[in-house]
Image (tube, helix red, strand yellow):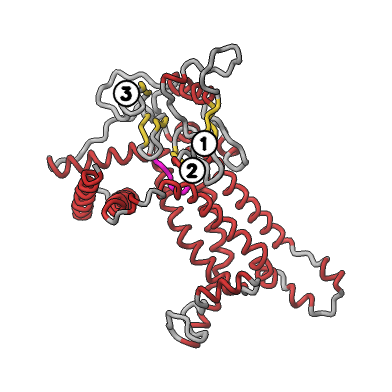
Amino acid sequence: MESERRILYEQEWNNTWESFLRALRSHDDFDPVYWLYRLVTGGLRYLYFKIGIHHLGSVQHWRSTVPIFGMGLICTVLMSYVFSLRNELANSWCNIESVISQETSPEQQRRIVCPRLYIHDGIIAYLGFMIMFHFISACWRSPGVVLSSEYEGIDGHEEDPVRIPPFLKWKSADARGGCFGWNPTLNIVAERNLVALYTASIPSSTETDIFPSLEWTYCDKCKILRPPRCHHSSVCNRCILEFDHHCVWLNNCIGKNNYRDFVLLLFFLTIGCIYGIAILCRHFFGPLRHQIHVHGWHLMYDQGTGFLNISPLHILLGALVWGELDPESIIKLVFPLLVSVGIIQVVFLSSHVRYILAGRTTLEHKILLDRQMDMLTHHRVEYEVPPNPFDRGWVENLRATLGRNFLLTMFLPLQVVPTSIPHQKKST
């Protein structure tokens, strides 16, 4: 069985690489996010069995530790600002050092006011809180699960002869949300109501050539009849309503119920990275320009003559433990991190905004691209995208994802429950 899966993933990787090369030579639109996703996932699946990592048996439990690592990175950046970068910005923006040097008493020093710094503190606190809020919400919140028939009789009333409690405890080690040590709970009644609301909002159409399909499908693995746009996740082994993708960083699937939190997490991460890059840009490139002017382009650390003049890892860790890490070194570490994460977030956020405006999910966009590539490869003709019955127009598509009053609620720490929005014909 393992050898068959290894051969299957090897063939899948070879086909993916050949398709990638054909896409590069094609005159059609090239989607770098799509191909990056396919190459990374296909390569990791192949290496997973090729190297023999699957024999370790503990890989599954490492999934639940990834959200801790993600939250740790966010907290590290915030703590570096609180304990070090804030003083550096205060000296630059408010001339605190020049004011203090004018024979001011300690009481007068404490009364020095810098409105610009206080506004900046508020922005940092707000962005940090919103990022953590939506990270935790998307991680712990159910994506919208279509449950099997054994839960049909559960409605939470004590007089009902219920064999299974109305709340289920998902295992974070099974990649069903939460993180190591904290397992999420599933409200069966809420899940049934969400599916019922979604089912009531399914549009009707007489057209046959449409995508996504309006037909109900049967899942052989879950043994359930599921509504349109519901797909089975091979990672957490359950059927997800409006399945978008499975996010490793959140240890959870992204679906109808937590897609809003996921998109807003990308949004505030992008804003936070851009804001951090803007305020640290001068503090990063100023010393860097001086370093290059004095010592030239020495990439490695060598008696203070390196490109970034960053000490070796063991020296950095020692200075961090003893609280002796200077602000300049922190800026040299934080700024490249913000730039790299910011670029990634801009790419992902722009892709998801495009999917939302088109009324599609990431999986549906991938399916369309696969069909387009198949038509080009085997028939040498362009694939005509069929009409989307779930596309209400870009305004209603945004409301369906972010909420009715999304221009207000998206900036507040709120969990908006997806509601049933009647489908109307898109205005032309």
Quarter of the C terminus within the rendering: top left
Question: Residue, x 45% and y 53% (percent of image)?
Answer: 346
Residue type indicated by callout 2 = Val
Sequence-wise first label, 1 or 2: 2
Q: Which residue is mark 2?
A: 263
Given residues 396 and 79, the one toward you in this image is: 79
266 lies left or right of 129: left
Q: Which residue is mark 1?
A: 402
Given residues 55 and 193, the one toward you in this image is: 55
Q: Which residue is mark 3?
A: 217
Quarter-wise, where is residue 326 in the image? bottom right
State yes or no: discs 2 and 3 in contact (Cβ < 8 Å). Answer: no
Quarter-wise, where is residue 365 in the image? top left
Q: How many discs appear? A: 3
Residue type indicated by callout 3 = Thr
Residue 85 lies in the magenta-colored region: no
State yes or no: discs 1 and 2 in contact (Cβ < 8 Å). Answer: yes
User: Spatial distance from mark 1 to mark 3, Cα to Cα?
Assistant: 27 Å
Report the magenta residues as a range. Answer: 245-251
